[in-house]
Image (cartoon, helix red, strand yellow):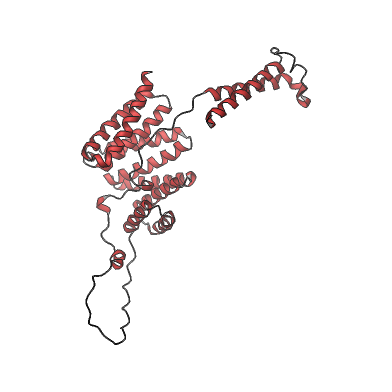
């Protein structure tokens, strides 16, 4: 017997005991004489109220035990560890640090019996830029080097100066904290990222600033949903979806933007279904399925698993609505 079934049985048994005890103690009726003379001690003057309270608690336990447990919905995995993405145009060229670490080609030298000369001091690499640090962060996250990620994030936070860099590093901090299960820290980081991203988009309304704000809002929505704050999650996902759709035809040739739109649609659909808006959720999943189908047709190896996951969720939702 599974733990869930055992918990249900215990809840039903306790609920029946409390409900029947309250029924008799409150004086509504009798189920034999086992509780009519039960001494309630200091609560004896309040026998009817005690009985009513016991009956209500028992009924609640029974109802809670009988209600079906919601199944966890399978979701598309993040496109990169911690949700970190590095746009192709932002990928830095080989850094001086990497160049210094690369082994040089061997050079034949004449044999000499004299003492070797002292090696020349290696050139000191210039400080890494914010973009280079973030590229390194993505690499470390894929290697599950969480300690190094934490130290590099702290360095990125100190190095960030512009609103855009501050938005990016706080969004990454939110991804890192959420991956570690630290929802309070993640929520605070995402909210800070949203504040900076709004300033960036206000001064420079580009596709990049739109994606930055939408990504931060999606993080806010994920944390709010995990904490059971469904109204806040719904609001964040709705705004993020509106931002992604505002790019319109411009994102049609951008697979990363299309996938982000598909994921956003499904996050919102799951919330709509939880609220009982099944037809609205179905429409959102069908829209996501169309996008996933186009992406999988263009790149089956990369987007095929996404299409399979979306198809499974869509079929499940259609089956629920038809019953």
Tell me residue 146's x, y (percent). 43, 53
Which of the two residues, 226 or 246, is positioned nearer the viewer here?
226
Give x and y (percent) for residue 262.
30, 36
| 275, 77: nearer the viewer | 77
Q: Which quadrant of the figure has residue 256?
A: top left
Q: Quadrant of residue 147?
A: bottom left
Q: Where is 184 relative to 11, above or below?
A: below
Q: Position of residue 274 (x, y in %)?
A: 43, 28
In the image, is 94 to the left or to the right of 42?
Answer: left
Question: Where residue 213 sits in the image (x, y, percent)?
Answer: 34, 43
Residue at the extreme bottom of the image, as rendered: 114
Q: Is residue 61 left or right of residue 315?
A: right
State the residue at coordinates (58%, 22%).
62
Residue beneath the point at 70% across and 16% down: 24
Between residue 5 and residue 210, name the one nearer to us. 5
Q: Can residue 172 be seen in this view?
A: yes
> Does 112 appear above or below 51?
below
**In this rendering, is residue 307 above or below 181?**
above
Q: Give whichever of 86, 224 is nearer the camera.
A: 86
The reply to whether residue 248 is in sight is: no
């Amino acid at each position: 017997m599974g733990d869930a079934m055992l918990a249900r049985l215990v809840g039903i048994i306790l609920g029946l005991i409390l409900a029947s005890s309250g029924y008799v103690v409150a004086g509504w009726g009798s189920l034999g004489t086992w509780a009519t003379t039960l001494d309630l001690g200091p609560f004896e003057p309040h026998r009817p109220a005690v009985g009513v309270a016991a009956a209500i608690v028992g009924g609640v336990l029974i109802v809670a035990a009988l209600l079906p447990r919601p199944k966890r919905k399978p979701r598309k995995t993040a496109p990169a560890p911690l949700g970190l993405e590095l746009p192709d145009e932002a990928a830095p060229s080989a850094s001086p640090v990497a160049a210094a670490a690369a082994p040089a080609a061997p050079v034949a030298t004449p044999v000499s019996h004299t003492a070797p000369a002292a090696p020349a001091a290696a050139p000191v690499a210039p400080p890494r830029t914010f973009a280079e640090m973030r590229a390194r962060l993505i690499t470390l996250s894929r290697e599950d080097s969480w300690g190094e990620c934490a130290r590099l994030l702290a360095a990125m936070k100190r190095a960030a100066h512009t609103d855009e860099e501050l938005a990016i590093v706080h969004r990454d901090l939110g991804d890192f904290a959420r991956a570690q299960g630290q929802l309070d820290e993640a929520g605070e980081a995402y909210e800070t990222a949203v504040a900076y991203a709004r300033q960036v988009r206000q001064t420079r309304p580009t596709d990049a600033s739109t994606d930055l704000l939408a990504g931060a809002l999606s993080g806010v929505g994920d944390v709010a949903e995990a904490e059971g704050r469904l109204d806040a999650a719904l609001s964040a996902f709705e705004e993020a979806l509106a931002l992604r759709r505002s790019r319109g035809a411009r994102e049609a040739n951008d697979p990363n933007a299309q996938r982000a739109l598909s994921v956003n649609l499904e996050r919102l659909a799951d919330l709509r279904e939880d609220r009982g808006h099944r037809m609205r959720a179905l429409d959102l999943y069908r829209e996501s399925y169309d996008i996933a189908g186009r992406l999988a047709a263009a790149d089956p190896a990369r987007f095929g698993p996404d299409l399979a996951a979306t198809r499974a969720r869509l079929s499940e939702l259609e089956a629920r609505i038809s019953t």
